[in-house]
Amino acid sequence: MKLTMHVNGREVTGEAEGRTLLSAFLRDALGLTGTHIGCDTSQCGACTVHVDGRQVKSCTMFAAEAEGAQVTTIEGMENADGSLSVIQQAFQDHHGLQCGFCTPGMVMAAAALLRDIPQPTEAQIRAHLDGNICRCTGYHNIVKAILAASGQPVAMAAE
Amino acid sequence: MPKDGIGASVKRREDPRFLTGRGRYTDDINLKGQAHVHFLRADVAHAVLNGIDTAEAAAMPGVLRIFTATDFAAVGGLPCGWQITDRHGQPMQEPKHPIMAEGKIRHVGEILAAVVAESVEQARDAAEAIVVDYEELPAVIDMKAACAEGAVKVHDDLASNLCYDWGFVEENKAAVDEAFASAAHVTTLELVNNRLVANPMEPRVAIGDYALHDDSSTLYTTSQNPHVIRLLMGAFVLGIPEHKLRVVAPDVGGGFGTKIFHYAEEAFCTFAAKQLRRPVKWTSTRSEAFISDAHGRDHVTKIELALDGDNNFTALRTDTYANMGAYLSTFAPSVPTWLHGTLMAGNYRTPLIYVNVKAVFTNTVPVDAYRGAGRPEATFQLERVVDKAARELGVDPAELRRQNFIRKDEFPYATPVAVEYDTGDYEATLNKALEMSDYAGFDTRRQESAGRGKLRGIGLSHYIEACGIAPSNLVGQLGARAGLYESATVRVNATGGIVVMTGSHSHGQGHETSFPQVIADMIGIAPDQVEIVHGDTANTPMGMGTYGSRSIAVGGSAMVRATEKIIAKAKKIAAHLMEAAEADIELKDGAFTVAGTDKSVAWGDVTLAAYVPHNYPLDEIEPGLEETAFYDPANFTYPSGCYICEVEVDPDTGQVEVQSFTAADDFGNVINPMIVEGQVHGGVGQGIGQALLENCVYDADGQLLSASYMDYAMPRARDLPMINVDHSCCTPCTHNPLGVKGCGEAGAIGSPPALVNAVIDALQRAGTDVGHIDMPLSPDRVWAAMNA
């Protein structure tokens, strides 16, 4: 079937089967490979996107369910001039990523959190990240990056 | 403090592409005309395979071809890269490791058939129509049962399920036994080092491609070491010479060891692409990863420590069963032996050590290196038994360790287990960690916890590891079938910019940022003048890849050696340009000067002269500025450190919560502190995961019970604390040019015993006599131990 939706502010159309998941549609039909697939049980969160303003694991819905929806992926998160957004910049400043595979999902989750809770506590950040697994960082610097992105003071890495 | 050279926390240049979704991982690659493969995998652990009927499946929509073991009759098995010689001088038992099951199924997940189709869905649908005729056999899962007389054999053509019975150092055995017989105190501990799954967040992917016009093959794969894959697959499996085989490992989403090895899926996709004249792609699902990625750890150990009347360690004796799984993965035999037995001295002066390891075949997925590989197993048992001894003797665990440490002035120190530590200062890291964790103030915190009904405990461990793998001559004697040098080509361009082609691979370690810091420092230019190229055998020199915390120590040293050659040649050119003696030329801040004069020529002018050799002594110096170096380390490096963990245990539920975690490491010199701290955070996260959450569990029939993230408890953000790290204690490595030791595995090595020691401390302070609990310390295990 042919599906149309608004992805990162642009109307896009692509082919999908009824069983095609939104995660696969974004990657295969639209070529938006920043959305990653790290598991097959909706546990890891690497495929996190925003659908109509809500944080969603894109493997938990069929592509057809997003017909007509507003979808934001990691490719739509940078500033208009191509520079890193506040959240992305905070991840770089605080070394909140290593291999980069979980990173798109982490950034999308962080953006949703900071929209709902502009100044979250460390505990609120950790609770919000419950659906996003990172194997590299021990979460330490991800938590720091999100605290920093919210404007709260955190220490920089050692010199 | 350097602005952006060695020692500066330079922000990572690889981050922007990852943060904007523009990384290029293997699964992001789609080749024109590619077909997709789905592997039909065994769902029983042990069976006689009578036949596979693919007729119906082959006729299904989109199916191009179905492969079974018979298609690989002319193809070799997956090679094992290390041969162990047993206690009696005999080589280990080494069964064939076929691409697909041949006549017998030996573990759940083993490949039975491969369906190649136009789409993944069509391949998957067709695989369901394949009929497998098999006769199930009893599975061999428990290692000790596998070694019993009359046990069912995993490999019918082998004498038994014992891969090898290794003794180390065999000549010391009698002396060790004698020391135990005359000891004032002996502490004994039986423990399990739980089986784990590495679980890099990016599942494995392989894409094979074949070019008919020049008979060449290309494999895109999620590997930590593309050259190793090219060598093993080309020379031993498919018979493709190196110049006709290119292996590319682009951005790789974590490795942790399990992406070192050469896997059947890589060989299959390369083979099938040639057969079908089309690219063939495989993307692992997470469910497949659990039953096809090599697992880690899985040791069962009895360890005994002998002490004299003054609490000095006099001897150590261990007896370990190590699970190999059904087949020998690439480096599996080396993990419980040379990467484990050689570390049993730890930080201590124990004069007599004997290690016995029985490696066992079982009907499980192959087991191989996982972050730390042998060294976490050594550290866990040693740091647990030392802790237990302290508690039995009623002395402070920190002080018993201190008393038995190798002293700062005793280096280089030859241990009784064949390695020589070049440098270290164990008291420094111990003192640092005690201070950072406010060890002295623990009782106040314990009382505060008690006020809330919680049992608080504190535990420490002091680890050593052998990194910078490894001197080739030495490992060759120990059975390695490969050299373990590293390489770098430094190409200076005409206008002064530099491209470094390295055999090291970066899959999260930040080499693209930290390696240029070194070169920038040596020449005195900005790091952004240096670019790192890695991951493609077509444009990098032969390298052994990234594992064993070896990249900066071995790969970085190769890069330094190549840069030294560059500087030597550039000085010759500069001498000519300034009409001065070569011996008088100095290089500083990106300019060559003549000592004692104000003559100067910029780096860029010298590099330009090398490529535009007009006024140039062509009879003395070749044009161009490009050098390659291979660096073979003289010794291992020996990072060490002290980790302290504080926990609270809920006495009603057995729930353990980590309250604080302190890591004081001695990594020698550090290139990028921010990256080093990140490596420790991640390693500690995995170590806490092993100690508290993760467990790979088979039932008696060989079914993997923990085969998804629903059942395998990966550490999540709420499970881990902020981690308090320090690397200011620094004894530089004495035998590599940067004085570096490596930091990738330390966190995973040092943290599990610290956490378990803390829980035991909490339970004993609460008046129980719990001496040990096997990992993971899940609430049910802790509660059961408290209420036994």
Image (spheres, grey):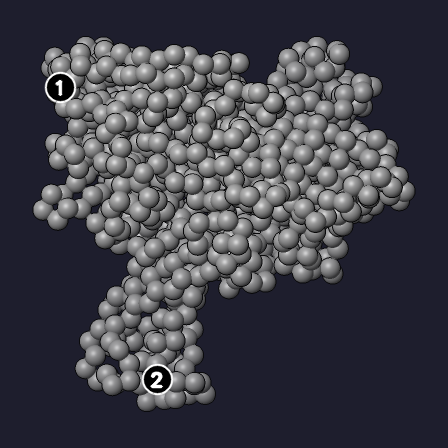
Q: Amino acid at mark 1?
A: Gly
| Position of residue B201 in the picture relative to residue B433 (left or right) | left
Q: Which mark is residue A113?
A: none
Foreground pick, B214 / B488: B214
| Position of residue B32 in the picture relative to residue A99 (left or right) | left
Seen at 46% across and 60% down, the residue is: B632
- Ranked by sequence position, the earlier of labels 2 and 1 is 1
Mark 1, secondary structure of its residue: loop
Q: Report the number of discs.
A: 2
Circle nearer the viewer, 2 or 1: 1
- Whether residue A80 is visible, yes or no, is no
Foreground pick, B124 / B554: B124
Mark 2, secondary structure of its residue: helix
Seen at 59% across and 62% down, the residue is: B734
Seen at 35% across and 36% down, the residue is: B77
Q: Residues within 10 Å of mark 1 (few under 14, many from 20)?
A: some
Q: Amino acid at mark 2?
A: Ala
Seen at 74% across and 52% down, the residue is: B406
Percent across and percent down for residue B101 are 34, 25
Residue hosting label 1: B62
Percent across and percent down for residue B640 are 63, 48
Q: Quadrant of residue B126?
A: top left
- Quadrant housing the C terminus of chain B: top right
Q: Residues within 10 Å of mark 2 (few under 14, many from 20)?
A: many
Q: Which mark is residue B575?
A: 2
Foreground pick, B307 / A81: B307
| Position of residue B456 in the picture relative to residue B14 (left or right) | right
Percent across and percent down for residue B80 are 42, 41
Q: Quadrant of residue B748?
A: top right
